[in-house]
């Protein structure tokens, strides 16, 4: 297993730790993560936020702050060369800043949510310079992959006994699907990584 750890400057806190409510939010997070990981952002001050890139069978991005650790699965492959990371797919050799910016622009266009399929296809053609057949596999992958969202919270502001445990795991992100599992642990990257790694012995729910 390869584990890359990058500090996140506080200026980018909202970009990584804003609320996740939809697949569109997950896609935006992925694009911003790749853009951040492949660009030399200057990090100033004390490092209290971190991006963890786990490359293994589990392939995940883990985002760490003082009271929150959460993760989404990465649908990309990663290659390291001369201390630089390249994210790629079987169809795209390098997901670069141009591609990530084009995807982010597409997400922000009202036609992305249009019920008219021709609006959506037209938006893809407008957003990318290359032939639509070249980017279509990437768009399909981003919209259909199982993102495996899991959040580990320490939440004193909203704690309410066993109805909203002080420390808890949030499973899923949409209002219709989400639920909490209380825990006596505070958020911990190592614990969450072990929980998600099928090569480790399974962890048990506490009684």
Image (spheres, rainbow, N blue to C red):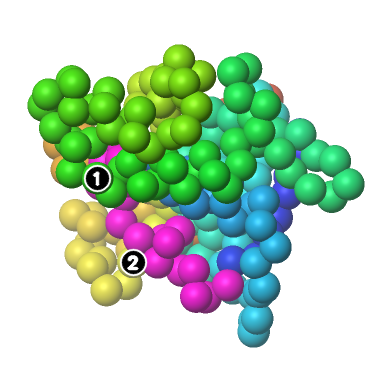
Relative to 191, 155 lies left or right = left
- In front of the other: 53 or 91: 91
Q: Residue at x 34, y 30 (%)?
A: 124
Q: Is residue 191 left or right of residue 179?
A: right
Q: Nearer the viewer, residue 35 or 189?
A: 35
Q: Position of residue 110 (x, y in %)?
A: 18, 43
Looking at this view, is 32 or 45 the one in front?
A: 32
Q: Would you say the residues marked 1 and 2 are in contact, meaning their CB atoms lie under 8 Å apart?
A: no
In the displayed image of the protein, which residue is found farthest to the bottom?
45
Magenta run includes residue 139 = no
Q: Which residues are magenta?
A: 9-26
Q: What's the magenta bit mostly, secondary-structure-wise?
A: helix
Q: Is residue 116 above or below residue 22?
A: above
Is residue 14 highlighted in magenta? yes
Residues under labels 1 and 2: Cα distance?
A: 34 Å
Residue 52 position in % (x across, y down): 63, 51
Report helix, strand or loop for mark 2: loop
Mark 2 crowd level (few <14, some 14–19, many ≥20, 10 Å Cα)? some
Q: Nearer the viewer, mark 1 or mark 2?
A: 1
Q: Which residue is mark 2?
A: 155
Farthest residue in the right direction? 82
Instruction: Please tell me in which quadrant of the rendered image residue 8 appears.
Output: bottom right
Residue lying at 12% horizontally and 24% vertically, measured from the top left: 116
- Residue 106 in the image, given as x and y percentages of width and height: 33, 41
- Quarter occupied by the C terminus: top left
Which quadrant does the N terminus fall into? top right
Label located before the other in sequence (1 or 2): 1
Write the residue at 41% across / 26% down.
139
Q: Which residue is mark 1?
A: 109
Left or right, residue 171 beside residue 10: left
């Amino acid at each position: 297993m390869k584990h890359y750890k990058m500090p996140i400057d506080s200026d980018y806190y909202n970009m990584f730790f804003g609320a996740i409510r939809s697949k569109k939010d997950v896609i935006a997070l992925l694009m911003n993560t790749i853009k951040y990981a492949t660009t030399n952002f200057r990090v100033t001050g004390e490092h209290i936020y971190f991006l963890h890139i786990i490359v293994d069978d589990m392939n995940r991005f883990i985002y760490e702050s003082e009271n929150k650790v959460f993760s989404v699965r990465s649908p990309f492959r990663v290659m390291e060369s001369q201390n630089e990371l390249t994210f790629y797919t079987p169809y795209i050799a390098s997901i670069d800043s141009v591609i990530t910016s084009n995807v982010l622009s597409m997400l922000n266009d009202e036609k992305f949510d249009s019920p008219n399929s021709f609006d959506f296809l037209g938006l893809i053609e407008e957003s990318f310079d290359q032939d639509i057949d070249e980017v279509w596999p990437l768009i399909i992958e981003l919209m259909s992959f199982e993102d495996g969202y899991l959040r580990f919270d320490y939440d004193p502001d909203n704690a309410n006994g066993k109805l909203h445990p002080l420390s808890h795991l949030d499973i899923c992100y949409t209002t219709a699907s989400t639920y909490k599992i209380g825990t006596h642990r505070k958020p911990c990257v190592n614990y969450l990584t072990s929980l998600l790694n099928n090569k480790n012995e399974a962890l048990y729910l506490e009684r």
